Image (spheres, rainbow, N blue to C red):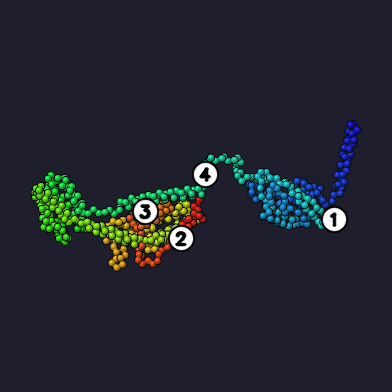
Amino acid sequence: MGKMLHKSLIALLLCAVALPVLAVDARAQAPAGLPAAASAVGLPAAATAASPVHIDVKWSNTQPVFGERVELRVTLTYPTGYRVFFPTKPDLRPLLVDTRDPGKVERVENAGTVTETIVIPALAVRVGLAKTPPIEVPWQAGAQGSAEAQAGTLTVPPSRLQVKSQFASETNVEPSPLPAPRPLVEENTPLEIALAAAALMLLAALLTAVGLKYYRDRAAKRAPKERVPAHVVALKRLDEFDRSGRAETAEPREVFAELSEILREYLGARYHFAALDMTTTELLAQLQAVEVRGVQPGELQSFAELSDLVKFARVPASGDELRNEAGFVRKVVERTMLTAMEQEALRKAEAERLARQKRLRLAVMAPAPLRLRAFAIDLFVGALLCALLGWVAIDTGSKLLFDLSYVLILAWLVVRDGLAAQSPGKAVVGLQIANHDDGEDPTPVRWHHSEDDDVPTAQLASLGARLGRNLLFALPLAGLIAEAVTCLYLPEMRRMGDQWAATRVIDARYGTRRGTPGWVPAILLVLLAGLLTAMPLLLGGRPG
């Protein structure tokens, strides 16, 4: 152990003597023009002050934000004749050299000195403290291999940058407080559309059911009832008069007033004139123009004169006279009443009248394809206006104008028949809206036919009726479906609006139209109008 320690001390002594000698020898062998600082690699910039090549490094921003572009600006200063080799793509990790931008190099020579500026773009791709590695920059002077040649390497010291997050605050590095919790709402557009469609279908079904029930109830109330013969009504009233005993208890003028009313009402209904509104003179003159069988005109005149004396002059009358006059009224009814054959003939005539009235009404009813074509034209006009306003709303970003564009088409379907005597579609196709008599007695104003060609005509509907028949179209889609179903189901194709407005659509070109209208053009036009209406929603959508 002692020998080993002695040998170690001797070795350390020899090294201490040899190191100064080696240092002197190395200094003697170095080239005369090469400074000691230039040959040292990894020295800081301050240690290269004696070098003919000077390097100045500067970053455009030492605190960039993540993803921000920064520039490394390198300025090289060296004598003319020197060559400095700064790397075109230096290692700047953790920064990333932006290869999309080659950067730029500027070289200026003045009074034997060259100033070269190199700009290298980089991207901050890592948050936190970034320290770039040192960059070695070789340089050379003179021709290689000559006695005057010099070379060396300078080292650019590491750079430090602080890369900030994009969410970092410049004034307060503390994180912002979390917002108040809010309920999570997820939009499910397909589900919303499906629910809206189901609601519309349900509403349409309810409207259709209500419309059909309304029609059945109305039709039952307005169904033509068989007329009771006039003599049946008169004999029933006379039987009730006899049973009441009013001939003995009531005032004579009241009895004659009742008997006169029964006789006048019967004669007016039997011979078709307004007997209740006539004076006695007018009534007797009217009876002379008709055949009152089994009754002498003088008998009717005597009853009428006696009735006036008792009613107005208060002439007294006994109970026997009153009973005799009641028997006379019964005799007139029984002698002049219709026979069974006459009643059957009248029933047939009435049935023929109603059938002819229905034939005349159906003759001018507009065919379904024509009605659909007129509606398709009206719908296309509204869809065109809706699409134009919708595109303007999308272009200007106006939510109100976008919503109004769809309200406009509903309003148009309601008022289209009220702007003029007929809507644009009906004017093009040749249809009109007329009143409907619902099977009641036709009047010459409402129904008549030409003596030449037997073409029926009708009275045009009023403004209120034309607007009222379209009120259901104010309901989006559901009203349209309900009206379409009832139009195809109900007789004479009078939809719900026509039922409550007492209107019908007639063919104004009846008798002059050639050919049978088809369904295909009308259906295609309806589909085109629907596509035009949905175009702003499908392509642009409601402004956000």
Q: Position of residue 343 (x, y in %)?
A: 23, 57
Q: Nearer the viewer, mark 1 or mark 2?
A: 2
Mark 4 falls on what kind of element? loop
Mark 2 lies on a secondary structure that is helix
Label 3 Cα neighbours within 10 Å, binned few <14 / some 14-19 / many ≥20: many
- The answer to whether residue 252 is left or right of residue 37 is left
Sequence order check: which comes first, mark 1 or mark 4? 1
Instruction: Check whether the beta carbons of the residues at disc 1 and disc 3 lie within 8 A of each other.
Output: no
- Mark 3 to mark 4 CA distance (whole Å): 41 Å
In x, y percent, where is residue 114?
74, 56
Q: Disc 4 marks which residue?
A: 185
Placement of 530 over or under 514, stated as above or below: above
- What label does residue 524 carry, if any? 2
The answer to whether residue 318 shows anywhere in this view is: yes
Nearest to the observer: residue 236 or residue 105: 236
Query: Is the residue under label 4 in contact with that under label 2 (CB below 8 Å)?
Result: no
Q: Earlier in the sequence, mark 3 or mark 4?
A: 4
Amino acid at dot 3: Met
Which disc number belongs to residue 496?
3
Residue 147, numbered label? 1
Eyeballing the image, is 226 above or below 165?
Answer: below
Report, in whole angstroms, how far the alpha carbon at label 2 lies from the one at label 4. 40 Å
Q: CA distance from mark 1 to mark 2?
A: 98 Å
Question: Is there any visible trace of residue 442 in the rendered image?
Answer: no
Q: Secondary structure at mark 1?
A: loop
